[in-house]
Image (tube, coloured by chain):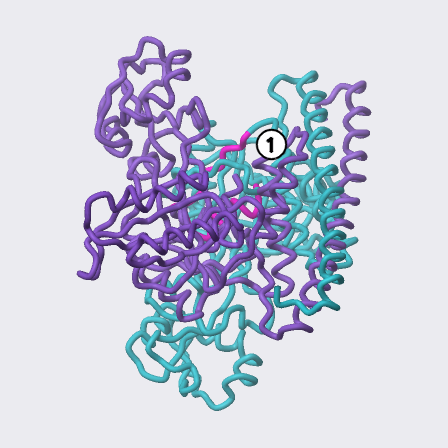
Chain colours: A cyan, B purple
Amino acid sequence: MSDKPNNTQALLNLRDEIDGIDKQIHTLLNQRATCAQKVAEAKLQDDPNAIFYRPEREAQVLRKIQERNQGPLADEDVARLFRQIMSACLSLEKSQKVAFLGPEGTFCQSAAIKHFGDWMQSMPMTTIDEVFREVEAGACEYGVVPVENSTEGVINYTLDSFLNSNLKISGEVELRIHHNLMTAKTNDPKNITRIYSHQQSLAQCRKWLDAKYPNAERVAVNSNAEAAKRVMSEWNSAAIAGEMAAEQYDLLILNDKIEDKPDNSTRFLVIGRSEVQTSGKDKTSLIISMKNQPGALFNILKPFKDLKVDLTRVETRPSSSSTWAYVFFIDFLGHLEDENIQKLMQQIKQTAADVKVLGSYPVAVI
Amino acid sequence: MSDKPNNTQALLNLRDEIDGIDKQIHTLLNQRATCAQKVAEAKLQDDPNAIFYRPEREAQVLRKIQERNQGPLADEDVARLFRQIMSACLSLEKSQKVAFLGPEGTFCQSAAIKHFGDWMQSMPMTTIDEVFREVEAGACEYGVVPVENSTEGVINYTLDSFLNSNLKISGEVELRIHHNLMTAKTNDPKNITRIYSHQQSLAQCRKWLDAKYPNAERVAVNSNAEAAKRVMSEWNSAAIAGEMAAEQYDLLILNDKIEDKPDNSTRFLVIGRSEVQTSGKDKTSLIISMKNQPGALFNILKPFKDLKVDLTRVETRPSSSSTWAYVFFIDFLGHLEDENIQKLMQQIKQTAADVKVLGSYPVAVI
């Protein structure tokens, strides 16, 4: 109504164009769903217990889309839309049940939704143990558990759960965590003279702070939650923290996503009962047990260097059984089907007291 | 790997077909995003404070899509996918902030996501009051509050909040609520001889129960939550309740979506600061105050009958001010821009002591 005449026609034309595009997208979505149904039928002919959800195939589709993406939609946005499309198509065959570490509304549920789309049925569990048990018992097809948090580090409990489980890792999910500038609702944003946060978060938002609050004092505290708590009752101060802290301490978010680089993330693992074929860009996770003898770790890591396998993570945990002094959780790039990785595995087996393969799975698609 | 040769080729062909479809969808999504950017530019030329999100336009797009939908994707599924697509396109212009009645993980957040898509930024509030305040203060563009629950009835608190607010209703959201059969994790599903639930829920699942548990005794209790609580510690019994009850009482969901008809829903209102133009299929909400005199309600309702306006709801609430004895919350089909509704409003104003228009907004798209 407020549009001036010259623009009104332009807007109407654009709307017509959008309507035409929507019509085509709509037709294609239903075509895609029909194809997915045919895939399911073909699979069922071969095997009445056929698995419809193929993590490696989804990862391939998403990577292909991101590679050719020209925008204006961001790579992350098109991946998110296509995950939803695949989720909707898959649900025509089977509604997937996914257990996650609850309660509802946690990052873990966000990770499950990011990975499996809106059409899965997510089942909140109270403990990481329970997520493992539900998937082991077959009550859920998959589970999602946190494994690494950019502020808290590795979730040891998840790693330890793998020691006593036969479940496989079938995927990883990375969730970006955003920083927000927040203050008490009674504060005037213009008067902020002091900004609290964890040192790491302050560093991650340095450029933004230099530009917007060049004169505010920056004070490092133990955690972002503590920062949020402080500004509840302190005049002229603000905190950098996550959205949930604003909720918990009833603060007003003045600016969101203020991090200089969007690389602040939390990592989750998808656990299931079956192995995943190669997607072309995979990660493998192992648990290696060894005797506590000098040079043990070096001996284990040497084959990685020799075979030029890219180690992405090594975690050391005390062994739960008394047989071995400690165990290593090792992640590296590559799939067990790869020739190079098969060589690596042979060499590791010669050195280690015991090797447990947690699985090869597609590297997280952002 | 387990596919037999004859089917393997068929599967590969189908995958190629899906890849081709995905490529087309991808191109169209970016074309759509480009059009959305142009719309925003045109709007900004006219008005630097232009509103990008048009509820009436979204409703029109979704209805058009559902009308022509041939499947296999369900109408609800295509609407959900298109909401996400629109949300992603809109986010290129402006990330919308939406306050909702928290905490995270409640149905109210689900309603906000259903309406605004994944790309909005949802802000959990502790009370309905706070949702109103955040939107009034301009800290959020929109708010989502519950207004009607199929088990608890109308949420009076939301209605009362409108009495002291100048916010407008800019939309309604309906969330389908599903029934699930659940039991204690130690129970064997084969041995269930008794099923607890609220009478209404038992009735809503009657056919399913007749087919699957013809011999189980059905026991009506006060609420679904109570049913869930009972079966926690009772052998050979199950409860019909929502997913959240299973979580709360640590029960195992044996079957989900067991309701005979999918018409069990909860209704939410979207509140904002601006009026919404007609979408062609709208609802209008009013608050009418009147003196406590015989025939008052009849006099107010008569023009609806005379003008054949479809009343969808009348709620009576005691007035918060002492001036009027009571107020009516009235919902009816039609938009204030409609000629017929303008006549209606004139007649109502002649009879009522005071009329407050809460807004005309698109009827919920399922």
Image location (x, y in percent) of residue B282: 51, 46
Question: What residue is at 34 percent from the left and 75 percent from the top?
Answer: A184
- Most foreground residue, A173 or B286: B286
Query: Can you name the residue that lies furthest to the top here?
Result: B215
Q: Is any atom of residue A197 visible in this view?
A: yes
- Residue B13 shown in magenta: no
Question: What residue is at 24 percent from the left and 22 percent from the top?
Answer: B220
- Most foreground residue, A240 or A77: A77
Q: In which quarter of the image is the N terminus of chain A?
A: bottom right
> What amino acid is at disc 1?
Ala
- Most foreground residue, A198 or A9: A9
Q: Is residue B154 above or below residue A257?
A: above
- Identify the image quadrant of residue A57: top right
Image location (x, y in percent) of residue A121: 49, 36
| Chain of the residue on which disc 1 is drawn | B
Image location (x, y in percent) of residue A258: 53, 72
- Most foreground residue, B74 or B209: B74
Q: Give the range drawn in magenta.
A: A95-116
For mark 1, give the secondary structure. loop
Q: In this view, does A4 lie above or below A333?
A: below
- Identify the image quadrant of residue A47: top right
Q: Is residue B75 above or below residue A104?
A: above
Residue marked by disc 1: B74
- Residue A106 shown in magenta: yes
